[in-house]
Image: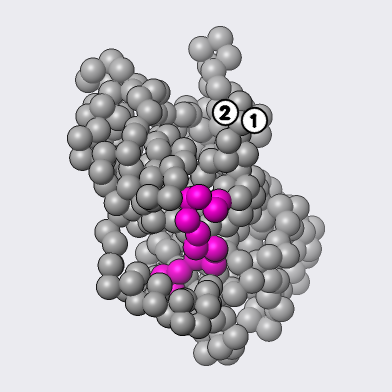
C-alpha cells in the first residue's frame, strides 16, 4: 500500500487529522535516526494504532521460485526450509544490526531468504524442514548474481500454515536440486554436487569488504568506504577462500564465501579476523588452518563457471557438508544406480 493510501486508511478508521498523523510520522522518522522511509514510518504508526494496512493474506497466489526476478516487489512464495544459516551481527551508524538467512525450496528451485533486525525474532522460530509461506517480500540480486528474497516490515511469514498445500513439494529438507557428477565429467554453467578431498589451499588475502546493509562489495575511496546504494559506510568483513578439490577422477579449483568458507577452514569469520590482526597478515588464517584442512573430505553443492583468466572451469559453492553421513550417501548411490537419479 502506498503512503497516501496508508494515510487515508488510518484517517478513515481512527478519525485522526492528517496534520496530527503526519506529525507522528515525522516524529517516528526522527526517533529512528532517519533510517526509515516516510512510507515505513507510516506503516509503523498504523501498527501502533491497530490499523491493518496489509492487503495480502494467505489467499495470495505464490510465485514459483524459478520465476522470481530481482525487480519484483510484494511477492508471495511458499516452500520448505532446507537450510538455516547463523545470525550475523554488524555495526551500522553506531548501532548493532542483525541479519539471518535460510534456504527455501518449492520444487522448482531454491532461493536464499534474508531476515533483518525486527524480523530476527520470527526467524529464530523457523526450523529446517518447516514449510513456510512468505507474503509481501521483495526480490534482490546479490553480488554473486543469485536471487534473494528479502523480508521487510511489510512482510508476513506463516510457519507450517494449515491453509496452504505443500504436498506438491517433493524436495526433501536436506537436499539441493542438482546434478551429482564426477569431476572428470564436469561442465560449465551447471548446478552440481561433488564429493572429494581438499588437496590444496591457496594462501592469499581471505577477506573482502561489503556494505553491512545490502551486502554488496564496498571499496575504499581515499580511505572512505562507499556503497553505491547506501553512501558512506562502516564496512563488514566477509571471508572467502580458494582451494583444490580432488575426487579421484580429476581435480578442480573451488571458491567458497561466507559461511561456506568458515566450514572449510573450521573457524568463524570473527576468529579469522582476530588471527589476521594478531599476525598483521590477511592470509594467515589460511596458514593457521592448513594442517586440518588438507585431506578434509567434503560434499560441495555449487555452480560451475568458466574462468577466462585460468582458461578452466571452477566451482563456486553454495552449500558445504563437512560432516558426511556415509551410510546415507552410499544408500543414495545404490538407489540411483538401480532407479536412476531422482534429484
Q: Main secondary structure of the magenta part?
A: loop
Q: Which residues are magenta?
A: 172-186
Q: Position of residue 243 (x, y in %)?
A: 39, 36
Quick check: can you spot residue 20?
A: no
Q: Position of residue 67 (x, y in %)?
A: 73, 65
* Residue under the point 40% across and 23% down: 205
Answer above or below: position of 53 versus 197.
below
| Magenta run includes residue 173 | yes
Circle 2 residue = 310
Question: How was this image coloured?
Answer: one colour
Q: Nearer the viewer, residue 283 or 237?
A: 283
Find residue 325 and report its image quarter: bottom left
> Badge 1, how many Cα within 10 Å: few under 14, some, many 20+?
few
Answer above or below: position of 251 versus 114.
above
Q: Nearer the viewer, residue 166 or 236?
A: 166
* Residue under the point 43% across and 50% down: 249
Circle 1 residue = 308
Which residue in the rendered view is the most extreme toward the top? 222
Find residue 6 and report its image quarter: bottom right
Q: Nearer the viewer, residue 213 or 107?
A: 107
Q: SS class of the residue under badge 1?
A: loop
Q: How many marks?
A: 2
Q: SS class of the residue under badge 2?
A: loop
| Magenta run includes residue 160 | no
Find residue 207 and report its image quarter: top left
Q: Position of residue 104 (x, y in %)?
A: 53, 67
Task: State yes or no: discs 1 and 2 in contact (Cβ < 8 Å).
Answer: yes
* Residue under the point 68% across and 71% down: 64
Measured Cα–Cα span from mark 1 to mark 2: 6 Å
Amino acid at each position: 500500500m502506498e503512503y497516501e493510501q496508508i494515510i487515508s486508511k488510518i484517517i478513515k478508521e481512527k478519525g485522526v487529522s492528517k496534520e496530527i498523523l503526519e506529525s507522528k510520522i515525522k516524529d517516528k522518522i526522527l526517533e529512528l535516526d532517519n533510517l526509515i522511509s516516510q512510507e515505513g514510518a507510516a506503516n509503523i504508526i498504523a501498527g501502533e494504532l491497530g490499523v491493518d494496512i496489509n492487503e495480502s493474506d494467505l489467499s495470495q497466489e505464490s510465485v514459483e521460485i524459478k520465476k522470481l526476478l530481482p525487480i519484483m516487489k510484494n511477492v508471495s512464495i511458499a516452500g520448505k526450509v532446507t537450510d538455516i544459516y547463523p545470525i550475523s551481527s554488524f555495526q551500522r551508524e553506531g548501532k548493532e544490526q542483525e541479519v539471518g538467512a535460510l534456504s527455501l525450496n518449492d520444487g522448482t528451485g531454491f532461493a536464499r531468504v534474508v531476515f533483518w533486525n525486527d524480523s530476527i525474532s520470527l526467524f529464530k522460530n523457523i526450523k529446517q524442514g518447516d514449510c513456510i509461506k512468505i507474503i509481501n517480500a521483495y526480490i534482490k540480486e546479490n553480488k554473486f548474481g543469485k536471487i534473494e528474497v528479502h523480508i521487510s516490515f511489510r512482510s508476513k511469514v506463516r510457519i507450517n500454515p494449515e491453509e496452504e498445500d505443500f504436498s506438491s513439494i517433493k524436495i526433501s529438507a536436506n537436499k539441493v536440486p542438482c546434478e551429482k557428477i564426477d569431476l572428470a565429467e564436469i561442465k560449465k554453467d551447471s548446478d552440481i554436487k561433488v564429493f572429494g578431498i581438499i588437496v590444496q589451499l591457496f594462501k592469499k588475502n581471505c577477506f573482502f569488504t561489503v556494505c553491512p546493509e545490502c551486502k554488496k562489495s564496498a571499496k575504499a575511496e581515499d580511505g572512505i568506504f562507499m556503497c553505491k546504494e547506501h553512501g558512506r559506510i562502516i564496512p563488514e568483513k566477509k571471508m572467502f577462500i580458494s582451494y583444490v578439490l580432488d575426487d579421484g577422477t580429476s581435480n578442480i579449483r573451488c571458491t567458497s564465501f561466507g559461511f561456506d568458507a568458515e566450514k572449510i577452514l573450521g573457524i568463524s569469520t570473527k576468529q579469522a579476523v582476530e588471527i589476521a590482526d594478531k599476525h598483521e597478515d590477511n592470509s594467515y588464517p589460511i596458514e593457521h588452518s592448513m594442517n586440518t584442512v588438507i585431506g578434509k573430505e567434503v560434499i560441495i553443492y555449487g555452480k560451475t563457471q568458466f574462468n577466462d583468466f585460468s582458461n578452466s572451469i571452477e566451482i563456486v559453492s553454495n552449500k558445504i557438508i563437512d560432516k558426511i553421513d556415509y551410510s546415507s550417501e552410499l544408500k543414495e548411490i545404490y538407489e540411483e544406480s538401480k532407479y536412476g537419479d531422482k534429484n
